[in-house]
């Protein structure tokens, strides 16, 4: 089997699959050998080619055995393949005995070449520099610096901002990661920073991790991993002009316990103490009062329950990143705010539920969706309500409403849905130039319904009438809708989104734009 010339796949020139079958017990034809070859060419036709080869062979094949039923059933629940840690420590002689076939002359030459390449100082230096440029981090002895793209940034409040991060790596501690940063703004003449520690108590079979952190800094707008923060040198060039940016300082102390329960279930417990201080274009702290404690201060206990059946991960030294599952992911978040603890001012409860999934619907591409909703019980300032995620940048944010500004809409009761359909080549396959460029097409829809109770409306909208720049609004049971389409896979890594806001009307939403063009960057096959 070979890859067709019309296939819209990046970085791969050729794919070949060879399979050999043998008869078992004169009645069953079974796979005996599986060979996979792929030619990777990243920089074009005239660049170097990386050839990937994988050969899988089978022997001592047993079929229709009752003794294997329980094993296969357990594998379906946990993992399809489990790799023993001792395998990576095997010597060359051990592998020679374990292999079903001996290595060919060509395969032995490849092993020797790779071993020599990995030992070359020039190659090691190149590898280190590329990792630093692409990932942002660099190891220096037992310490880690970066990300470099956060070293310099700036905004209206802080002016030019310098930041330096320092962390540990596995050479110092295998299961403990220490990290901190110090930042300074030349306009507000104030230091900010963070100190945190991760402790992995257990990696396998069920992960257990502790996290303790202290942060005192201007809120950078990140709510999900992978988003572009305001504290980023690239954000200087992609900020939306002519919008009122809002700044708030957050002093946060938190302790987290993550515990994997097995079969896709996990829990994450949080204890946090947060103190907010508004800085610019938000109502001053002085207009808020509290029966006990300090205004804009809260102490919270929360629990996140997550179910992701057969979820797969890519693991680094201290973190792991989900590469998805074939099944929907369900997350339930419960939180309780308690007044009177460490000057906290508010009693409240929160509950939210999210269901999300990524599905392949061949030959019609892929569909990803997220459906969510939540309810907040209690009367309190905007800092503890649902500030629906807006985007102040021209970098597309899949987790936010890109034509909405940050701190624009508040809710204490809400529901929403996001949908993205990637259709592959779509209409571009019928245009010779776009077919050759391998452009891809997609559609997006984001909808939000929200409301604010009379008590919270009085605290957060009527109270800030003298401060019109805050622009706090509530949807008042109205629906916010954004739809979009665009071009993906431009030069194999760029994406352009064309977004329209269908509701609410400009008369209600204000001066915000009803149309926007956003860019983003992603590496994909």
Image (spheres, rainbow, N blue to C red):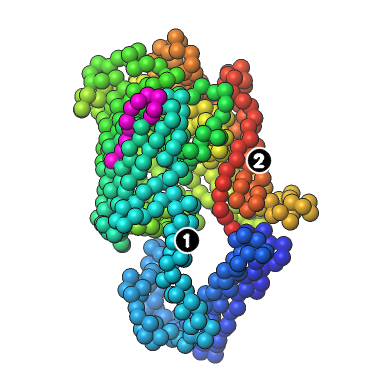
Give the camera-side residue of 48 and 419: 48
Residue under the image location 42 percent in, 40 percent down: 151
Query: Crowding at label 2, few (<14), some or many (≥20) Cα neighbours within 10 Å?
Result: some
Query: As drawn, is 267 to the left or to the right of 400?
Result: left
Secondary structure at badge 1 equals: helix
Quadrant where the C terminus lies?
A: bottom right
Q: Earlier in the sequence, mark 2 or mark 1?
A: 1
Residue 207: % across, % down: 31, 56
Quadrant where the N terminus lies?
A: bottom right
Q: Does the magenta run of residues contain 415? A: no
Seen in the picture, residue 390 relative to 11 is either above or below; the reply is above
Answer with the quarter of the image where residue 381 lies. top left
User: Disc 2 marks which residue?
Assistant: 485
Seen in the picture, residue 296 relative to 239 is either above or below; the reply is above
Query: As drawn, is 41 to the left or to the right of 208?
Result: right
User: Disc 1 marks which residue?
Assistant: 126
């Amino acid at each position: 089997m070979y890859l067709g010339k019309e296939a819209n796949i990046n970085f791969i020139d050729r794919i070949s699959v060879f399979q050999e079958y043998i008869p078992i017990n004169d009645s069953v034809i079974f796979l005996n050998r599986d060979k996979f070859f792929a030619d990777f060419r990243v920089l074009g036709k005239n660049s170097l080619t990386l050839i990937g080869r994988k050969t899988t062979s089978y022997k001592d094949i047993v079929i229709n055995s009752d003794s294997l039923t329980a094993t296969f059933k357990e594998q379906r629940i946990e993992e399809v393949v489990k790799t023993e840690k001792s395998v990576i420590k095997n010597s060359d002689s051990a592998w020679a005995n374990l292999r079903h076939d001996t290595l060919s002359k060509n395969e032995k030459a490849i092993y020797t070449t790779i071993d020599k390449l990995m030992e070359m100082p020039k190659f090691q230096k190149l590898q280190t520099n590329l990792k630093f440029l692409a990932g942002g981090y660099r190891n220096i002895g037992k310490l880690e610096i970066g990300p470099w793209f956060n070293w310099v940034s700036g905004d209206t409040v802080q002016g030019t901002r310098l930041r330096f991060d320092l962390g540990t790596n596995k050479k110092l501690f295998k299961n403990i990661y220490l990290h901190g940063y110090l930042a300074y703004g030349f306009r507000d003449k104030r230091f900010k920073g963070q100190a945190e520690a991760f402790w992995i108590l257990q990696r396998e079979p069920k992960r257990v991790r502790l996290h303790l952190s202290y942060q005192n800094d201007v809120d950078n707008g990140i709510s999900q991993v992978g988003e572009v923060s305001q504290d980023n040198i690239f954000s200087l060039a992609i900020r939306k002009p002519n919008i009122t940016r809002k700044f708030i300082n957050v002093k946060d102390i938190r302790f987290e316990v993550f515990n994997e329960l097995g079969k896709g279930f996990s829990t994450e417990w949080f204890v946090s103490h947060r103190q907010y201080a508004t800085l610019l274009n938000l109502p001053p702290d002085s207009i808020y009062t509290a029966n006990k404690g300090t205004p804009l201060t809260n102490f919270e206990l929360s629990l996140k329950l997550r179910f992701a059946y057969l979820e797969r991960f890519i693991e680094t030294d201290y973190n792991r990143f989900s590469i998805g599952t074939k099944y929907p992911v369900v997350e339930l978040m419960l939180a309780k705010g308690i007044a009177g603890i460490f000057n906290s001012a508010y009693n409240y409860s929160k509950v939210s539920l999210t269901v999300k999934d990524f599905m392949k619907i061949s030959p019609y591409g892929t569909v990803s969706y997220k459906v969510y909703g939540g309810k907040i019980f209690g009367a309190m300032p905007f800092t503890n309500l649902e500030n629906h995620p807006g985007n102040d940048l021209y970098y597309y944010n899949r987790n936010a409403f890109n034509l909405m500004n940050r701190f624009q809409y508040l809710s204490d009761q809400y529901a929403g849905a996001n949908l993205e359909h990637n259709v592959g080549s779509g209409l571009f396959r019928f245009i010779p130039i776009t077919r050759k460029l391998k452009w891809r097409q997609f559609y997006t829809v984001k909808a939000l319904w929200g409301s604010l109770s009379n008590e919270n409306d009085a605290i957060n909208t009527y109270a800030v009438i003298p401060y019109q720049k805050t622009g706090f609004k509530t949807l008042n049971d109205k629906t916010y809708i954004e739809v979009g389409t665009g071009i993906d896979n431009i030069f194999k890594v760029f994406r352009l989104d064309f977004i329209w806001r269908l509701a609410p009307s400009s008369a209600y939403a204000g001066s915000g734009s009803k149309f926007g063009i956003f860019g983003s960057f992603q590496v994909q096959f």
